[in-house]
Image (cartoon, rainbow, N blue to C red):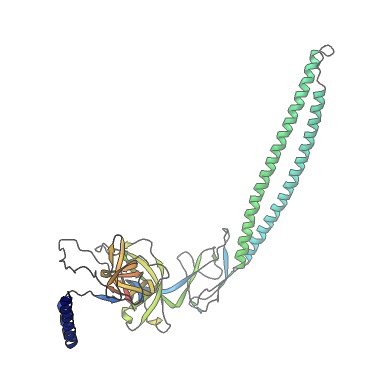
Amino acid sequence: MIKKLLITAVVLAALAAAGYLFGGPVSRRISAWLHPANDDPVPTLSLQPREYRVVVSAQGALTGLDTVPINTPSPRSRSRWSLKIAWLVPEGTLLPAGSTLVRFDRSEAALALEQNRNTVTSYDHRLDKNSQDARTDTRLVELDQTGADQEYEFARRQIRKDEDIFSRWEIQESIMNAALAQYRKGVLARKGELRGTLNQADQKILGIERGRAQAEVQSAEEILSSLEIQAPVPGVVIYRESWFHRLEVGGEVWPGQPLMDIASLSSFKGKIQVAEASIAGVKEGAPVGIRIASLSDQDFTGRVVKVARVAEQIVDEDPRKYFECEIALDVPPDVLPRLKPGLRLTAEIETARQAGAFVVPKCAVIKKDNRFLVYVRDARNGYRERPVTIVDSDHGFFVLDGVRGGDVIALRHPYEKQQLHLPDFNAASTMTTGRRFIVIG
């Protein structure tokens, strides 16, 4: 036993001496022999928060200056009379915001206000008189009912019952008198109820008529308070004219009638066509970046002001449908003369933005049992599963939630051999829409 222990110690000492003398090269050779180099390395990605933007590309053309419509004041209650123009700003005038555009004649509105106020006053008098008449009728009915009650009580006490003293005729006459007094009492009670119902109906009818006249008074007051229209924005005055109406001093207009437009000198309008597959996320107020082919040296910004509710086919030969969107461009004053309606433009509508987003290729996300996972490298150069949530996706990318900055993730399954497959050329090809793309800062 002692001999075996001595032999073992000598062998270990020899191995230690060999490791000391040939430590570096020998150790590496042995390690390389025991652990051969990995011929299938796992690609990785170090996650850093980046700017994430989703935009929709569309094409269109300029249509003209951005205009603000000016209409005749329209009161809440419908007016039955027109307004006469007393003063009008000349067409083509450049005005700042808050300048007076139109002044209306006050005479007709003031006359209507006075007439309707008199009507309201007359209905107030009629309501008072009806209330007094109702109280008088109620008092008279009460007096009649009191007399009928007394007559009934007297007739009831005068009923003859003794056949030995009174004749049969007298007995029947007393009974009939009592019955007649009772009937008269019931008739007066029903008459009082009917009179009260009629008085209430008269009060309601007069109240409705008074309310109608009061609404006309409010309408006239609103018109009188807005007989001067002011410009809401700066711009150039453009009249609205038609074959049957000309805007001029002395002309009559009706509440709600379009009068003119204020053309803004700092905003130009355009229309773009957004593909049906790309309309998701496009809404009013979305920012737009614009490039005009004839002004390649200038970039424009703007916003979406209107989105069509129905998609339409533009070209008969093209079966695709498009949503027409109206945009407003912010134009510097020195560039405005260079813009002409009909110029072709390319627009990029921003539908989503996230300052600190983690964007990874779709190949890095693995679906397992209705869960989405990524493999994160740990301190021992191994990989651990981590569940994540997909916030958004676009083409070959996912925006993830559940990872942190500095995490190193595997771009494929680290514990499965990568297998290459030829595509199935018989399968139907998926049509890429090019709806959106990701810009990573």
- Is 428 on the left or on the right of 107, as rendered? left
The picture places residue 55, in percent across and down from the top left corner, at 34, 72
Residue 20, above or below 250:
below
Rendered-image quadrant of the C terminus: bottom left
- Is 26 on the left or on the right of 343, as rendered? left
Dividing the picture into quadrants, the one containing residue 400 is: bottom left
Residue drawn 57% across and 66% down?
84
Residue 252, above or below 168:
below
Dividing the picture into quadrants, the one containing residue 332 is: bottom left
Rendered-image quadrant of the N terminus: bottom left
Dividing the picture into quadrants, the one containing residue 404 is: bottom left
Residue 212 in sight in this render:
yes
Q: Residue furthest bottom?
A: 21
Residue 36 in sight in this render:
no
The picture places residue 6, in percent across and down from the top left corner, at 17, 79
Residue drawn 77% across and 27% down?
181
The picture places residue 135, in percent across and down from the top left corner, at 76, 44
